[in-house]
Amino acid sequence: MNFQQLRSVREVQRRGFNLTEVATALHTSQPGVSRQVRELEEELGLALFERSGKRLLGFTAAGKALLPIIERLLQDADAIKRASLELQGREEGCLSIAATHTQARYALPHVVKDFRLCYPRVVLHLHQGSPQQVAEMLLSGDADIGVATEAIAQIPSLVTLPCYRWSHCVVVPPNHSLARLTRPLELKDLVSFPIITYQQGYTGRSHIDEAFEQAGLSPHVVLTAMDADVIKTYVELDMGVGILASIAMDEVRDRHLCAMDAGHLFQINVTRLAIRHNHWLPGFAFGFIESFVPSLTRQVVMEAVAAHGKPASDEI
């Protein structure tokens, strides 16, 4: 048994059982992938895949049972390589961050810039997706650190820590009637207009829906998007009233729009940082975390991991 065989099995699962894509990802040939899989099956005495001729259709029951172990072995092997660099005092390697569009666009740029200055020999990979996709990237080992709101805190195998609180705002063109209100904005004011806001599962959308439902109101949502910049674009075209994260508004860049605080209308949101509970983190990963949230020192993170039940890193 060798790591190339294990990587072949893992990549087959990741590439939807398409051996051509697996071969490309592993920089080898399709027959080479088939050989690695077959030799592993012969050594184990088990068929890992259901087949139709030379095509792989899916995992057998044995394959499904062994896949999580294969994932852990490969993740641990990667951790050994990264730990060896740190033991040598070499601050180099890769750090993978998974974040929602709003966090990547508005919360992380200065953190990334500062990190690159502090750790010039570390390659930073920034992935974007929904909170569910961020969680999946963490669980699969494709990301070391996740930054998201909403559902990420509900994943049992992830250790999550609060980063900061934020509210929504309502955005309209300057000549809109809502911009001329002399009293605090109310939910009933919004249902008279088309609404443009986030897709389900993104950036506090559940809190928006809950507020209208609890008030017995039905908003007319005409357009949804993952990205606040997209929402603002269509608001500028006067296609509707935008509801988006307040951190996504910039007074200079968005001077053609009027933003009204909606913190009193919708529940306050909490952005959270997440790591997998059994994932070893290099020292520079803690540097990134503390640059993002100064109160989340290495000690604080490690205490949270310990409270979760399993260590994310061995002290070096």
Image (tube, helix red, strand yellow):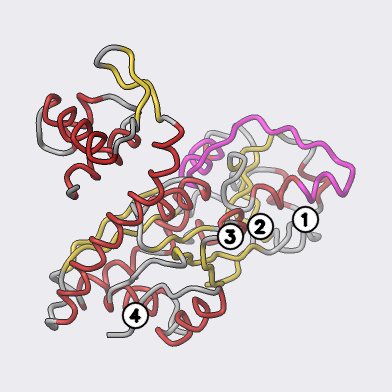
Choose the circle earlier in sequence order: 1 or 2: 1
Q: Are marks 3 and 4 in contact (CB under 8 Å)?
A: no
Residue type at tag 1: Leu
Residue type at tag 4: Asp
Q: Secondary structure at mark 4?
A: loop
Q: Quadrant of residue 242?
A: top right
Q: Decide which of 244, 310 is in the foreground and name it.
A: 310
Residue tagged by mark 1? Answer: 185
Q: Are marks 2 and 4 in contact (CB under 8 Å)?
A: no
Q: Position of residue 99 (x, y in %)?
A: 43, 55
Q: Residues within 10 Å of mark 2 (few under 14, many from 20)?
A: some
Q: Residue 314: which disc?
A: 4
Residue type at tag 3: Pro
The residues bearing labels 2 and 4 have C-alpha atoms spaced at a distance of: 47 Å
Q: Residue 260: which disc?
A: 2
The residues bearing labels 3 and 4 have C-alpha atoms spaced at a distance of: 21 Å
Choose the circle earlier in sequence order: 3 or 4: 3
Q: Secondary structure at mark 3?
A: loop
Q: Are marks 2 and 3 in contact (CB under 8 Å)?
A: no
Q: Decide if residue 184 is on the left or right side of residue 297.
A: right
Q: Are marks 1 and 2 in contact (CB under 8 Å)?
A: yes
The residues bearing labels 1 and 4 have C-alpha atoms spaced at a distance of: 51 Å
Q: Residues within 10 Å of mark 3 (few under 14, many from 20)?
A: few
Residue tagged by mark 3? Answer: 156
Q: Residues within 10 Å of mark 4 (few under 14, many from 20)?
A: few
Q: Residue 81: which disc?
A: none
The residues bearing labels 1 and 2 have C-alpha atoms spaced at a distance of: 8 Å
Q: Decide which of 126, 232 is in the foreground and name it.
A: 126
Q: Secondary structure at mark 1?
A: loop
Q: Residue at x 66, y 43 (%)?
A: 176
Residue type at tag 2: Met
Magenta span: 210-235
